[in-house]
Image (cartoon, rainbow, N blue to C red):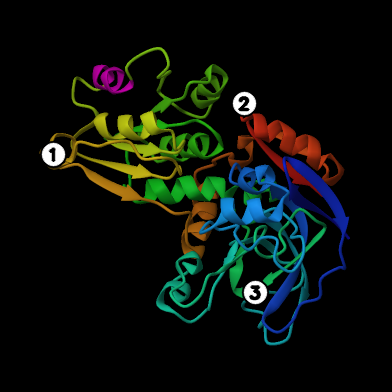
Amino acid sequence: MRGVTFPGDRRVEIMNFDDPTPGPGEVVIEVKASGLCGSDLHAYRAPTDDAAFRELAKGKPYETMRDNGPKIAGHEPCGVVVAVGPGVSERVARLGQRVMIHHYSGCHVCDQCRTGWPQMCEEMVPDIYGWTAHGAHAKYMKCAAHTLVTLPEGLSFEAGAAIACGSGTSYAALRKVQPNASHTVAIFGQGPVGLSGTQFAAAMGARVIALDVNKERLETARRFGAAETINPAEVDAPEAIRELTHGRGAHFSIETSGAQQAIADAIKSLRLWGTAVFVGLGRPPVVDFASDVIFRQISLQGSFTFSTNIMEECAVFSVDRGVEVEAVFSDRWSLEQAAQAYDLLDKQSSGKGVIIF
């Protein structure tokens, strides 16, 4: 089979690999949709020179990505089970089952792994499909059976690919604050994760204020359910949010961009007792913890992707509330168009892409 790899320096190489065979506790899926994620750009942009790559990647999830040969990219997989390895019961996986894949695999036995959080594994550095183990930018993908999450019949494979990372991440962040119709939620950044957050927060009944410096993304946010939009390049964002909330500020803010100013504004835009949830990875700003956090009794929370249980909950929520999750995809590509797809993603000016098989 052919699979997409990142040799470095913003290049894509499609290489030939053997079709995978499942070992004990493993399955193989036939990939139907494989999303492109902004985090892929770290590996896509990394230097070809191995020493320079090692220095850049030190301590990051993709540090061992090139160990034992090139890895197939793609960590937003969705497809159908086509082979089941020894020791996998039908309760876990069966032929023909429509599935998403939780893209981390840890020790399987520590408290974090047993509760569906293998990315937090206490015993080992987990495998990350599409990074340190082969991912889904290929016709077939092998994974640990315990990483499978059933895709409800009411969702498309594209929707499942979205939930497998970006959309699931935004749902998990919102789940930390549980917004409802009495709440205003300010979502900073309307890239794929932020737009998904706008979709879900609106479906939860909240009043959403969407913020981004890209006017096209703000227009999309309106279509996804945002009640108000703000361009921080044109106005003072915290002040604009206070004007829209009777001088009080938002109940909750979700920061998805990782931009330093957005991180600071996500805190300053909150009302008393508000909560800011941080998803985007970026350089932190200088925060006045006395006046901005302590005296206003603000809560700050981090949110790192999601658990297998939350992934399943997100899928069911999407069916029950009629959320068109796949609408986050603006571009659909074939495997052979992967170089073009990542060149567009690298510009970070469009929506989200997905490879369809």
- Which residue appears farthest toward the left when viewing the image? 295
Label 3 environment density (alpha carbons within 10 Å; few <14, some 14–19, many ≥20): many
The residue beneath circle 1 is: 290
Given contact means CB atoms under 8 Å apart, are the residues at marks 1 and 2 in contact? Answer: no
Quadrant (top left/top right/bottom left/bottom right) for the N terminus: bottom right
- The rendered magenta stretch, by its main secondary structure, is classed as helix
Q: Horizontal and vertical percent for residue 301? A: 31, 49
Q: Horizontal and vertical percent for residue 356? A: 78, 46
Q: Residue at x 20, y 20 (%)?
A: 246
Q: CA distance from mark 1 to mark 3?
A: 48 Å
Q: How many marks?
A: 3
Work out whether residue 1 or residue 145 is closer to the camera in this orientation and state it: 1
Q: Amino acid at mark 1?
A: Ala
Q: Nearer the viewer's eye, disc 2 or disc 3? A: 2
- Above or below 41: residue 26: below
Q: Residue at x 70, y 66 (%)?
A: 67
The residue beneath circle 2 is: 349
Q: Amino acid at mark 3?
A: Ala
Given contact means CB atoms under 8 Å apart, are the residues at marks 1 and 3 in contact? Answer: no
Picture quadrant where residue 253 is located:
top left
In the rendered structure, the answer to whether residue 336 lies left or right of residue 93 reads right
The residue beneath circle 3 is: 145
Q: Which residues are magenta?
A: 237-244
Tell me which label, 1 or 3, sits earlier in the chain. Answer: 3
Q: CA distance from mark 2 to mark 3?
A: 36 Å
Query: Which dot marks residue 151?
Result: none
State the SS at label 2.
Answer: loop
Picture quadrant where residue 24 is located:
bottom right
Asked whether the viewer can see residue 146, the reply is: yes
